[in-house]
Amino acid sequence: MLKRLLITGANGGLGRMARERLGHIAETIRLSDIVAPAPAGEREEVVVCDLGDMDAVMSLVEGCDGILHLGGISVEDTFDKILNANIVGVHNLYEAARKTGKPRIFFASSNHAIGFHRQDEYLDASANLQPDGLYGVSKCYGEAMASLYHNKFGIETAIVRIGSCFPEPVDHRMLATWLSFDDFVSLVECIFRAPRLGCPIIYGASDNDLSWWDNKAARYLGWRPKDNSSRFRDKIEKTVAKPPADAVQSVYQGGKFVADPIFE
Ligand code: NAI
Ligand code: 15L
């Protein structure tokens, strides 16, 4: 069991769910966000912190042996916002990890790091990066930081390219990208319990019939997702219009992010 797990982005969608469901993996859970999470309960600590503030991140990481890094900008946005949270913030987090006991890290990367790959490609961990926006580029940076700090300093990170982690898939694309909350929880458990982690790239998707991603390279971790988006197929087909075959949502893995402009 971990002594203290830090969850960044604890006020976000995944952070709130992780708070509810992952209390058992550490003696203490330290919950942090730039927007105050709900007050601390038993075995919890709450710290309001901007990831872009190096001194604050240094204190935040001190005393933690695991980090579930969910904090940051989670969709396409202006470069300034992405720079502070996802570039400076990730640098601060890895520097703090290096200086304070080298905790194991779950880095919430995204399918948008490879979003310009087409949906008829089947990608494994060796796929080349093809980000679909500045947000995707920031995830590529985070993945590179994880690799650097593993090779140079031995800090272990699971680089998890999350597909779409929501209660259920809500469009046709998500039939391939959906990661259920149960499978997210079992992945986090697996990552923090593995005797040896290294620095694997893992595609965060459930065991969906429709799949663009091959997780063979990470099988040694023993994570076996159990949910399958196919049980929502009928509902989606009945309630959501299918985009035309030549629409970005049907062509590229990143879906509509591919068509986002550069926000100013
Ligand atoms: P979210 O947007 O709901 O939560 C992100 C949290 O980070 C927010 O509570 C926000 O206040 C906080 N944050 C933003 N800037 C910050 C800063 N400068 N300092 C500290 N905290 C800051 O996102 P969600 O859906 O919970 O995703 C969590 C992580 O997983 C994100 O890194 C996202 O990029 C990644 N991800 C999520 C996917 C999903 O399907 N939910 C898919 C792929 C990646
Ligand atoms: C992401 O990276 C986002 O954080 C999330 O909100 C979804 O848009 C997801 O990708 C997706 O591609 O469905």
Image: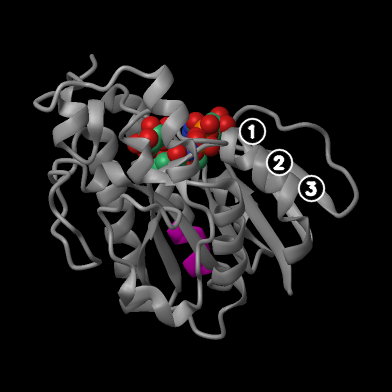
- Rendered position, 205 above or below 244: below
Q: Under tag 3, what secondary structure?
A: strand
**In the displayed structure, does residue 187 sit left or right of residue 17?**
left
- Kindly tell me whether residue 258 is visible in this rendering: no
User: Which residue is denoted by mark 2 in the rendering?
Assistant: 47
Q: Are marks 3 and 2 in contact (CB under 8 Å)?
A: yes
- Kindly tell me whether residue 35 is visible in this rendering: yes
Q: Residues within 10 Å of mark 1 (few under 14, many from 20)?
A: many
In percent of the image, x 79 and y 47: which residue is there?
A: 45
- Residue type for callout 2: Val
Would you say the beta carbon of the disc 3 residue lies within 8 angstroms of ligand 1?
no
Cα–Cα gap, marks 3 and 1: 13 Å
Q: Is residue 58 magenta?
A: no
User: Which residue is denoted by mark 1 in the rendering?
Assistant: 11
From which residue to which does the magenta span run? Answer: 94-99
Quarter of the rendered image showing ligand 2: top left
**In the displayed structure, does residue 49 sit left or right of residue 63?**
left
Would you say the beta carbon of the disc 1 residue lies within 8 angstroms of ligand 1?
yes
In percent of the image, x 51 and y 59: which residue is there?
A: 96
User: Which residue is denoted by mark 3 in the rendering?
Assistant: 45
